[in-house]
């Protein structure tokens, strides 16, 4: 799905390094489930595409439209590195992205200037990602997180977002809801955003993977907040539609989770536990 290959042995070193968050964090719990993270990633991209100035940076400076798998792969690695990597790996990934952002400037589809380093744009990307990841985890993996655990997730991710240059990020679920709603007047579903949504809705891949990716894409759209469907000129999915998609995701997730049970999160846990021996 995201172009990953081979066992993630880089996450085994150095022994005992807990990384930015550590194995007891909520981030380690939420980000360990590839299925719900993929779904959350799709919904966050849809939300980000609705912000003209945030979208302009991707539109002008990314290979997203020509290489969706590559873009998702780079994003997936960044999340893996900053969540499960050593402190050095995480910082290296953050520095690399921050350095790239320094050179991303231009004007959006309305002629308004943008810089990828603007805290306002970085905050929009951050809050839509964190909201979408947590929402996907609760819808498609584990609905039993307490409000305190959900708040803890946003508090942990606030640290990462501010290392990326965002400022005054929300630290709770309620604050994140409010922060997202504050951006609604700035959102626009024009031709550019429509082309991104069409690309995600018809995920480019070979024929064998098409049904799976189509399901993941639909689940990603169903992971959106209700207000987003009005912006997208789409009806809000009904309970039966959602139930059918959830049941299908639950079924297909079984072999995917089994295949990835010794993935990045497991390797990172092994690295931290080695300090005890």
Image (spheres, rainbow, N blue to C red):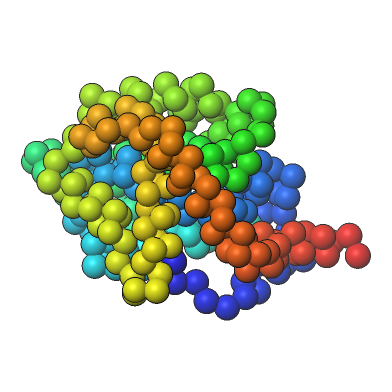
Q: Quadrant of the C terminus?
A: bottom right
Farthest left residue?
A: 111
Outermost residue on the right side: it is: 277
Residue at (71%, 49%) from the top-left corner? 22
Q: Position of residue 31 (x, y in %)?
A: 58, 50
Residue in view at x 36 percent, y 29 percent: 226
Is residue 215 shown above or below 13?
Answer: above
Residue situated in front as seen by the camera: 98 or 31: 31
Q: Quadrant of residue 240?
A: top left
Q: Position of residue 167 (x, y in %)?
A: 43, 33
Examine the image and state in which quarter residue 121 appears.
Answer: top left
| Residue at image point 37% right, 53% down | 217
Residue 153: which quarter of the image? top right
- Residue 252 visible in the current orientation: yes
| Residue beneath the point at 48% across and 59% down | 76
Residue 263 can be seen, yes or no: no
Quadrant that contains the N terminus: bottom left
């Amino acid at each position: 799905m995201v172009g990953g290959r081979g066992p993630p042995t880089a996450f085994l070193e150095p022994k005992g390094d807990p990384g930015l968050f550590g194995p007891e964090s909520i981030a380690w719990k939420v980000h360990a489930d590839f299925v719900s993270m993929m779904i959350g990633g799709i919904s966050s991209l849809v939300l980000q595409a609705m912000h003209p100035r945030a979208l302009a940076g991707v539109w002008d400076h990314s290979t997203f439209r020509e290489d969706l798998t590559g873009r998702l792969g780079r994003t997936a690695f960044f999340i893996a590195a900053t969540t499960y990597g050593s402190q050095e790996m995480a910082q290296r990934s953050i520095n690399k992205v921050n350095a790239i952002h320094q050179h991303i400037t231009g004007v959006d589809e309305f002629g308004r200037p943008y810089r990828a380093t603007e805290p306002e744009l970085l905050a929009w990307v951050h809050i839509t990602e964190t909201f979408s990841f947590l929402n996907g985890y609760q819808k498609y993996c584990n609905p039993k997180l307490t409000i305190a655990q959900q708040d803890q997730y946003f508090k942990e991710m606030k640290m990462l977002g501010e290392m990326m240059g965002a400022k005054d990020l929300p630290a709770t679920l309620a604050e994140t809801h409010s922060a997202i709603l504050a951006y609604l007047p700035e959102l626009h579903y024009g031709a550019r955003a429509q082309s991104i949504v069409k690309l995600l809705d018809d995920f480019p891949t070979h024929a064998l993977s098409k049904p799976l990716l189509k399901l993941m894409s639909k689940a990603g759209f169903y992971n959106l907040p209700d207000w987003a469907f009005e912006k997208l000129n789409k009806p809000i999915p009904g309970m039966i539609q959602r139930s059918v998609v959830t049941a299908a995701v639950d079924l297909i997730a079984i072999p995917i989770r089994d295949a990835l049970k010794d993935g990045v999160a497991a390797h990172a846990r092994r690295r931290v536990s080695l300090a005890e021996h």
